[in-house]
Image: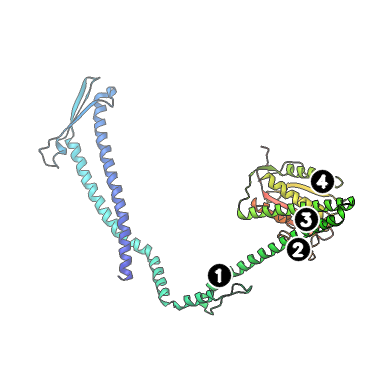
Amino acid sequence: MTETRRMTSTAARINRSFMLRLTYLMLWLNIFVLVFTALGFCLYHEIGTLGSYWQPNIERSIQVDSSLSWWQVPGSLKYTFWSPIAQTGATVSGGRFMSVVLCCSVAVLVLEIMTLFSEYRIGKRRTQKLLTPFYRMAETAQTLDQSFDSKKYHDLEEAILHVDVATEDARIRTGDRDLQGMEDAVNGLLRRTHEAYRQQTRFVSDASHELRTPISVIRGYADMLDRWGKNDEKVRDEAIAAIRKEADNMQRLVEQLLFLARGDSGRQQLEMARVDLNAVLREVCEEMHLVEPEREFLLTSTEPVYAQGDIGMLKQCVRILTENAMRYSAKDERITLRAFINKKNESCLTVQDNGIGIRQEDLPHIFERFYRSSKARTRQGGTGLGLSLAKWIADAHNACFDVLSREGVGTRITLCLPSCEQKAL
């Protein structure tokens, strides 16, 4: 079958389906009009004869002469009704009326048939016109399929099978311009896979390093206890304190790793509710003041600032930011906390210190797991996972961080969350 004949056949099928639906619509409309006309005829004579005595449950009957031909039957129709309450009724001849209705119905039927025939011819041409672009696309696709050499697919398959995925610069190259788009897509996938593998390897290496240090310290103090601590109370107390401290560090590190693992696997659930950020900051200030009573914590805002979030997670995020500010600033330096609504109508909270600051080249990486700005990995009492946890919490709340830092001046980290209505519950 040629493309022209195929297009004509498809257009005819679509047009027939449309015409069938139109015919059904006209049929039901005709039935409705005839029923409505008959009811109107009956009610007209009933109400005209009975007046106020008319009721829906009066006695009714219809008589026709069945011995006549079908076209003569409507003319013999007689309609009889009787009202028991009024003790009156009438017999009305519907012959003339029904003959007029029959003539009108035949005229309307002929007109509808002509309309359907005309609509069929016009609709067929219209459907063919609408389908023309699709058939041109099909013809073009068929032409391209016939002109494309299947050997190119085999070349691409061979290039993918022989690529050495173990090398970091693994790429596929066929030298065919028609396959360039597929090559770029596969190479992009390889690049992302290597990047994910590199991050995973670095994560495992950094986690091992973080765990190796406290284990080495605990083992060293255990050896010291075994040698001298049995009889020397000073050595014993020092070793116990050091072992307890390193055990606490290990416990905190393991808990943070488990938190991130649950978050990455989607098992960390959030209980979203309306939260007053100023109340969260106030509670964290009180907690931190108990930890370091000599340090000043300043909460500069008091008016409620509402956001939608998990209060426990948001409090944990503020603790992380506050502990970081305490860790990298002197004990006599003030930590400032504030909640506010920014120009984008976002609910924000800020933790600011006057500490050592962050180098500009390190700012894009501070939320990476185990990242440290110092290449020597100098320990400051942290695990290197705090800001990663804060970043996960922010992402779970569809929030973002705004970080402003200058070396020797200080750091200000702002968490911006989608805002709620600013009114009390």
Residue where numbered disc 4 is placed: 291
State which tag comes first along the sequence, 1 or 4.
1
Identity of the residue drawn at 77% across and 47% down: 338
Q: Do the CB atoms of the residues marked 3 and 2 lie less than 8 Å apart? A: no
Q: Nearer the viewer, mark 3 or mark 2?
A: 3
The amino acid on which the numbered mark 4 sits, given as a three-letter code, is Val
Residue where numbered disc 3 is placed: 382
Report helix, strand or loop for mark 4: helix
The amino acid on which the numbered mark 2 sits, given as a three-letter code, is Asp
State which tag comes first along the sequence, 3 or 2.
2
Residue where numbered disc 2 is placed: 362
How far apart in space, not on screen, are marks 1 and 4 (Cα)? Answer: 53 Å
State which tag comes first along the sequence, 4 or 2.
4
Report helix, strand or loop for mark 1: helix
The amino acid on which the numbered mark 1 sits, given as a three-letter code, is Ala
The amino acid on which the numbered mark 3 sits, given as a three-letter code, is Gly
Judge by depth and name the residue closer to the eye, 107 or 417: 417
Report helix, strand or loop for mark 3: loop
Give how far across and how far down residue 199 sits, in percent. Answer: 67, 64
